[in-house]
Image (cartoon, rainbow, N blue to C red):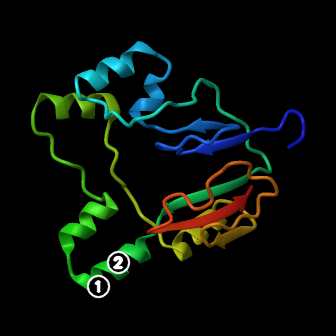
Amino acid sequence: MNDGEFMVNMGCGATPTPGYLNFDNSLALSLSRFPLLPGLLRVCRILPEDSGRWVGGLEEPVGYADAARRIPLPDLRHFVDRYLENGDGDEFMDKTCLAAPSCRGFKDRLRLLVVGHRHHLWMYDSRSLQALLESVGFSPVVPLAAGETTILDPGQLNLREREEGSLYMEAVR
């Protein structure tokens, strides 16, 4: 990278990447600004023990002109194929996270209030994601296999993160 350039990891989840600005809508990332609160929420069993440490802090939007975006997403095709093989609708709904979990009790309601819904509102296969990205002006849009990238220096970015059941796309706008 050149001076003044930086790498951004949007949707870092439980695995922030060293050397990147890591962003996610997870509870742990939001709470990283308040160092004592995550510990308290872990003790109360509202935040899981393995929620990790997070890099956060930028309040302003980050400019992305002519930036490459790497987009790893759950692959709808993978989960449909698996469902067609085993016929297990419960597994399909569980693995795709298409349904919001039910709230049973105060702890669940508090988690929903603080974190919001963490389920998927939409899913894509490679073809539909590529078409969407192209329709909003990304070009080129490149579908990739796990472990592949068009980014010249991805640093420590895990190019196989959530490999089972994921699709990977890189695009520039």
Residue 103, quarter of the rendered image: top left
Q: In this view, does 161 lie above or below 27?
A: below
In the picture, measured across the screen, residue 101 lies left or right of residue 38, that is: left
Element type where label 2 sits in the image: helix
Residue at image position (66%, 38%) is: 18
Element type where label 1 sits in the image: helix
Residue 2, quarter of the rendered image: top right
Dot 2 alpha-carbon crowd within 10 angstroms: few under 14, some 14 to 19, many 20 or more? some
Q: In this view, does 162 lie above or below 22?
A: below
Residue closest to the far right? 2
Name the amino acid type tagged 1.
Leu
- Residue 8, how many percent across, how many down? 67, 41
Residue at image position (20%, 76%) is: 88
Q: Name the residue under label 1.
A: 84
Residue 42, quarter of the rendered image: top left
Dot 1 alpha-carbon crowd within 10 angstroms: few under 14, some 14 to 19, many 20 or more? few
Q: In this view, does 64 lie above or below 73?
A: above
Do residues under tags 1 and 2 come within 8 Å of each other at their CB atoms? yes
Name the amino acid type tagged 2.
Val
Q: Mark 2 points at which residue?
A: 80
